[in-house]
Amino acid sequence: MAIAERPIEQQHQHQTPRELVRPISPKDAREFVRVYHPNGKCSQGLGTLNFGLFLGKQLVGVCTWGHNISQGETAKLMFGNHSTGKDYLDNLRLVVNKSSGAKTQPSALVSFCAKILFKFRPELRYLVAYSSGIYGYLGKIYQASNFVYTGKMKTNYFYIPNYGLVTSRSIANYLPSRRLEYMQKIHPGAKVLNSYNYRYIRFRDDKTKRYFLDSRVRCFKLPESLPTDAENETIDSDGQHYPSGYFKHMSSLPYFDIHK
């Protein structure tokens, strides 16, 4: 029976002495992410499948899956016509409350969810995950979860004084221009922060991995080494350099909140 034909709760559970992973509602996932994820207050981040890690009855972790950008766009950029766009999901949010006493590590949570997705979603051939370099995350959790590092992509945020970081996508939803000159007229002192996202892929099996990483299929160059803190820096629009993790404790906020 297909996964969509009955609740996922009836199909599986992952039990440690006191810990359980099961699907949760978008509402529960959203509230947890808002509190515990450094990027939690962004409007993006909730997918069609949301898993929760429970310590007894307490929700202590969340792992959400869906499509980070328009469905199929990531597939097209990576594999051209070799991927349908319906054969993958993005890991949108992954966070465990470290102060809760949970023994399950984030890498174990995402790995377990990946196994469940591949088991009950036969159309999935791979999963995609991104680590935000601006927060100093290099993807070590995904490295420990059998994901393959496939390279880094440029990304940028706006820094707005007395507010925080805002993604370009959030700005585009509410303003007619994302040009820095335009932003500085509204928010004096605003800067653009240029950084990287690090992309990882976990394949269904070794056969699928060999197929997609074949040079005749992939549309990207495989990196020779894993990312390091030394290469992971952020540069602002004034040319100032910031070390890896400098913005780790600064939330990324949706732009509409600034008008509340």
Image: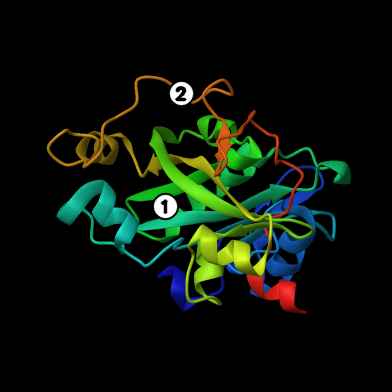
Q: Residue at x 12, y 37 (%)?
A: 216
Q: Report the disc number at residue 226.
A: 2
Residue 235: x %, y % from top left: 56, 37
Reply above or below: 229 against 2.
above
**Residue 68: mark:** none
Q: Which residue is mark 1?
A: 118
Q: Are marks 2 and 1 in contact (CB under 8 Å)?
A: no
Image check: 114 left or right of 21?
A: left
Does residue 108 show up? no
- Quadrant location of the N terminus? bottom left
Of the image marks 2 and 1, the number of the one nearer the N terminus: 1
- Left or right: where 260 falls relative to 71: right
Where in the figure is residue 218, as x and y percent of width and height? 21, 40
At which x and y percent is residue 161? 74, 56
**Farthest residue in the left direction?**
216
How many C-alpha atoms fall within 10 Å of the one at disc 1: few (<14), some, or many (≥20)?
some
Task: Looking at the picture, tell me which residue is in the foreground, 89 or 8.
Answer: 89
Residue 92 falls in image quadrant: bottom right
Gap between marks 2 and 1 measured at Cα: 26 Å
